[in-house]
Image (tube, rainbow, N blue to C red):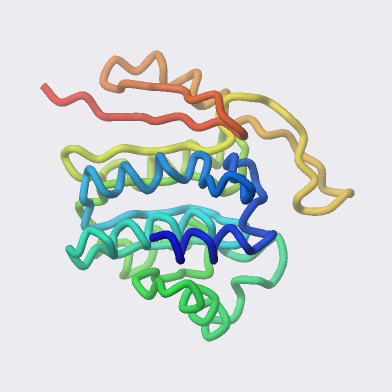
Amino acid sequence: MDAWLNQLLAEPEMLQMGHGQDAASRSLGLGWIYYGLARALRPSRVVIVGSWRGFVPLVFGKALIDNGDNGRVVFIDPSYVDDFWSDPARTAAHFARFGVGNIGHHCMTTEAFAQSDAYADLKDVGILFIDGMHTATAARFDHEAFRPRLAENGVTLFHDSIWVRPSRIYGADKVYEHRVKDYIDALRNDKLLDVLDIAIAGGLTLVRELRS
């Protein structure tokens, strides 16, 4: 784990996007929560919607490898920010550099993925991580698309979920507001859900289905 941690935190782009990472103190920030949840829950499937340069898929992928249960990461990102995820060979090589080969990338939107055979075959999702387009509408769609696929003890994590703020990630001429918080506030009224905010870095919200 030490060598892998050092390698990951040596990449400047892996320290971005509000997960509270810190190279000086060798900290994954919120990544410790991602890693710890995957190690504790031991899911067979983790679904991740959106990632800038793969920090979250890599952390979850590493945790599943360390579990030794052949767990897989389903990573969905249409590469709208730039072309980083557009080439399958380059994507596979990027993850392979970190020794993580259990990530399957789908270069498409959640809407397109929900019409695919891969979606039809998906079940028992232990962890769902939502970090795509940060509107309330997009967060709702991502959640509702995979909510029926969650395992009995499955949890959903929303990143950038606590504060409303502008984002220029799609370009200076395409500024929009992060409004995931609006969807999270609506979820608090659902009596079938537990909702917990963690106010670190970009903010994280954990949502758990209550079972009768």
Percent position of residue 83, x then y: 69, 72
Vertical position of residue 86 compared to residue 173: above or below: below
If the image is split into quadrants, where does the C terminus sit?
Answer: top left
Residue name at image x 63 percent, y 41 percent: 18
Q: Is residue 149 visible?
A: no
Q: As drawn, which residue projects farthest toward the left?
A: 212
Q: Can residue 22 be seen in this view?
A: yes
On the image, which quarter does residue 153 sit in?
top left
The one nearer the camera, 121 or 125, is 125
83 to the left or right of 206: right
Vertical position of residue 8 compared to residue 150: above or below: below
The one nearer the camera, 69 or 73, is 69
205 to the left or right of 149: right
If the image is split into quadrants, where does the N terminus sit?
Answer: bottom left
Vertical position of residue 86 compared to residue 200: above or below: below
180 to the left or right of 124: right
10 to the left or right of 8: right
Picture mark count: 0
Vertical position of residue 199 compared to residue 60: above or below: above
Residue name at image x 63 percent, y 30 percent: 179
Residue name at image x 38 percent, y 55 percent: 60
The one nearer the camera, 77 or 68, is 68
Residue name at image x 43 percent, y 56 percent: 59
Percent position of residue 191, x then y: 29, 15
Q: As drawn, which residue projects farthest toward the right?
A: 173
Percent position of residue 55, x then y: 53, 57
